[in-house]
Amino acid sequence: MYAIIETGNKQYKVQKGDVVDIELLPQKEGDISFDKILLISNENNIEIGTPYVSRAKVTGKVLNLFKDEKVINYKYKSKSNYHRKKGHRQNLMKVEIMEVSL
């Protein structure tokens, strides 16, 4: 059984036992539940939400919090001495999916 969840304006295909890296949520530790489930599938049928499947349930456990690798944004214009360099590190959390149920 697998589900497609939406969190942080991104979509993830998850099933029981998966470990996914998602954007940092307000809940920092303990169990977490996802309420935006777009699709859920078991062995013989698929249920697609409009926009979400209301009776589906996906829960997980927060393993740790960390920062992603640095992303460099560099702007350059020739012949005008224009250089701008910015760096960004996204805060992420590692979540293990404990249950996917319909």
Image: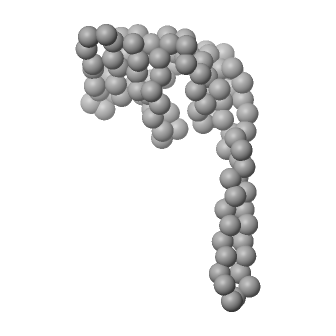
Say left or right for 68 vs 45: right
Percent coordinates x, y for residue 49 in the rendering: 29, 26
Q: Is residue 86 above or below residue 53?
A: below
The image shows residue 80, relative to residue 87, as above or below, that is: below
Give x and y (percent) for residue 65: 72, 29
- The quarter holding residue 57 reads top left
Q: Quadrant of the C terminus?
A: top left
**In this picture, residue 24 sits left or right of residue 85:** left
Q: How is the image coloured?
A: one colour
Q: Please name whichever residue, 1 or 24, is drawn nearer the observer in this view of the structure.
A: 1
Please name the residue shown 31% across and 32% down the image: 51
Mark count = 0
What residue is rendered at 73% in x and 66% in y?
A: 85
Quarter the N terminus occupies? top left
The image position of residue 29, as x and y in percent, is: 69, 20
In the figure, 11 relative to 88: above or below?
Answer: above
Please state if 69 lies on the left or on the right of 59 as rendered. Answer: right
Residue 80 in view = yes
The x, y position of residue 42, in whole percent, is 33, 12
58 in relation to 73, above or below: above
Whether residue 32 is visible, yes or no, is no
> Which residue is pictured at 28% across the width and 25% down the height?
48
The residue located at (55%, 13%) in the rendering is 17
Furthest residue toward bottom: 79
